[in-house]
Amino acid sequence: MVVFPHLVKYHWFIVPIGMIAVVLSIWRLDNYSLWQDEAQTALISRSVAQQGVPLGYDGKNNFGQELGAEYDEQYRWRWQPWLPFYVLAGFFTICGESTFVARLPFGLFGAATVVATYFLSFAIWRDRRAATAASLILAFSVPFLILSRQCRYYSPAAFFSVLSLLGYWHVTSGKRFGGALFVASILLLFHTNFVCVYTLLPALAVHAVLWNRDRLRVLSICGALVMIVCFPAVYWFSGAVYFKRYGAIMFNAEMYWRHLSYFINQLESHVLSIWLLEIPVISLVVHVARNTHHLCFNSALWRGLSCLLLVIAANLVILPLVVPAAFFRYIIMLVPIIAILVARIAITAARWHWTVGVLVVTLTIGRGPLLDYVYEMTHQFRGPVDGIVAYLRDHARTGDVVGITYEDLPIKFYTQLRVIGGFTGEDLSPSTNADWIILRHHHVDPGKEAPVRAFLSQQLRSGRFERIILDYPDTKWQNREDPAEHLFRTAVGEQPVILWRRTNK
């Protein structure tokens, strides 16, 4: 009964930081429409709310992006774990469907990750200043905020990863209920994104052998319990043809090094400035000069450092092997981990003078595009999907058929129209007499898109269509979550979105 008041009294500063994180994560979530990947999550979650199980087809439209490889013969989803779909389905059932609601649970998970990062940092370093610094760095991390505001599994994966690490740390520290927290968090992480489990558990196993051999029995029991509970899901998802679809890429040495280089570059560009690593080196040199170098090699410090570094290393070694492409979203779980490391570096710097530690935190936050993020949150964004959906809602008739080269899923979510095209791999013949044809300006995946573009172009030549130019830029995507591609402002200088409406029907 006294635990919660004690936490509030001792860790009170996390309360305002958590409130800031909530505001930054959910403010104006409906500033622009869902893009392709987000709409897929929303559509599958709608099927859960309606049918009780994640489906890739609703009887009218197909929700796939992998040419039909994501589901079985009954359209039951096999490409990703189901927990995010059920969470969002619950929000849809209670709050109704909208862009804001579609992103809301994920924004809240992002804010919760900030709070969890505080307690993980405190558990590792036993220092409230380091915990506060880590949570502040994460709360103002623009790449993390952008991904947290996506209607996708990213922020739940980060949250359960941090919670799993916290559970592991409690187990190895002999804390009460540590095993329960560890097992529950790993199970929830598995059902959010099982790849995160495959990178996290090897790192923790190595760390346990190095530092916590006395807890190996308890950890082994926890691991065995996780494997037993997860076995049915492993069997189920093994039915997906993921390796058949991407096996050639995954086991290609050239692609491995390309992915690894991308991940390292993205971490340096958006998460960890390389110059920060000079601070521990300088600190070591100073200690050696003063003959106090033994202070740099205490077991508590290196037990924490090795845990975080092993998690980072495991992700950088394993992820390039198993991901189909290099995207920042695959390393989102490393952002809180690196925030905890940077916080420790800031505390080290603060021993020279407290202002140096504050400067490290300030520069880490300030190097991100925080002003651009504030601009995005305070100004209306106009993307291609916004224009297409708005026009179709006003002018399309019930029963109209839309043919589109890609980014079909948002139209399926926002309208009741029959939409054909995209990367579904479905039969294109129902679009032979499509009422609307949309040939997006960019070519994003020629292997999947080219047949659709060729078929729709043929329909365009064989009928009479009215050309409609929208005052919306036809950017490559509505708005991607990747820091390198995310747009904080409405694009200028882009070709406008063009719709073709059939006039001879």
Image (spheres, helix red, strand yellow):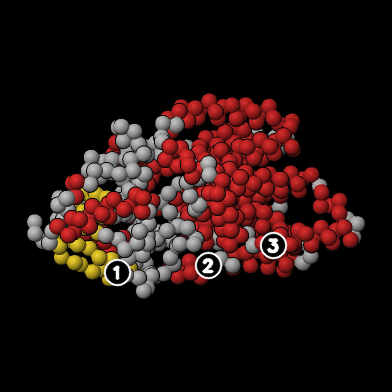
Q: Name the residue rendered at 33%, 40% in the picture.
A: 68
- Does residue 35 lie above or below 470 as drawn? above
- At mark 3, the secondary structure is helix
Quadrant for the N terminus, please. Answer: top right
* Quadrant of the rendered image containing residue 349: bottom right
Q: Determine contact: label 1, label 3, CB under 8 Å.
A: no
Q: Determine contact: label 3, label 2, CB under 8 Å.
A: no
- Does residue 124 lie above or below 371 as drawn? above
Q: Point out residue 296 in the picture as x, y percentages from the top left corner.
A: 81, 52
Q: From the image, state whether disc 1 or disc 2 is nearer to you.
A: 1
Mark linked to residue 412: none
What amino acid is labelled 2 in the image? Pro
Q: Is residue 392 left or right of residue 260?
A: left
Mark linked to residue 496: 1
Mark linked to residue 276: 3
**Label located before the other in sequence (1 or 3):** 3
Q: CA distance from mark 1 to mark 3?
A: 44 Å
